[in-house]
Image (cartoon, rainbow, N blue to C red):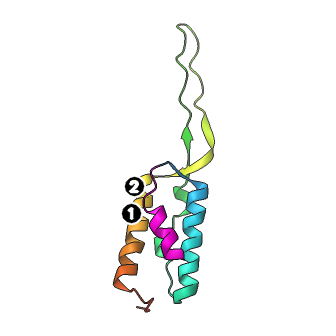
Amino acid sequence: MAVAQLSFRSHVRTPITQAIVDEYQWIIKALEEATGEYLQQFSIPPASMEARPIPELRRARGFAALVPQFTEEKYCDKELFQTKIGGLWEHIEKHPRGTKQ
């Protein structure tokens, strides 16, 4: 079941939110429990989750510069997410029965 969910998440087209990362981390944990393997090298480090800048409205001439504002929700870089999930897929393909290295 976790592998099926991983397949779905490998094709995410939206921004990678904390909820998506949490689900991915759950999938890694489920795979670890099912196979007995340590797979945390494929997880998303918490430090890689960052708030995004909120686009500023155009400022009228003569107003002071606004302080940058950021979203409350944190996001994962899409390239990092794809790299981690791709690495996990490659590992699963090389070790389809969950054999330990």
Residue 20 in percent (x, y) is at 56, 58
Task: Look at the picture and state if 31 lies above or below 20.
Answer: below
Q: Amino acid at mark 2?
A: Glu
| Distance between mark 1 and mark 2 Cα atoms | 6 Å
Looking at the image, which is closer to me, 64 or 51?
Answer: 51
Point out the stretch of residues depicted in magenta: 1-13
Left or right of 23 on screen, residue 11: left
User: Does the segment drawn in magenta span residue 4?
Assistant: yes
**Residue drawn at x 40%, y 91% as measured from the top left:** 101
Residue 25 in percent (x, y) is at 57, 69
Q: Amino acid at mark 1?
A: Thr
Instruction: Tell me, for residue 75, which label it has, or none.
Output: none
Task: Look at the picture and state if 101 lies above or below 44.
Answer: below
Instruction: Tell me, for residue 83, which label it has, or none.
Output: 1
Mark 1 burial class by Cα count in 10 Å: few <14, some 14-19, many 20+: few
**Marks 1,2: beta carbons within 8 A:** yes
> Can residue 89 be seen here?
yes
Instruction: Tell me, for residue 79, which label it has, or none.
Output: 2
**Residue drawn at x 38%, y 71% as measured from the top left:** 87
> Can residue 46 be seen here?
no
| SS class, disc 1 | helix
Which image quadrant: the N terminus? bottom right
Residue pushed farthest top? Answer: 62
User: Does the segment drawn in magenta span residue 62?
Assistant: no
| SS class, disc 2 | helix
Looking at the image, which is closer to me, 78 or 49?
Answer: 78
**Residue drawn at x 53%, y 29% as measured from the top left:** 55
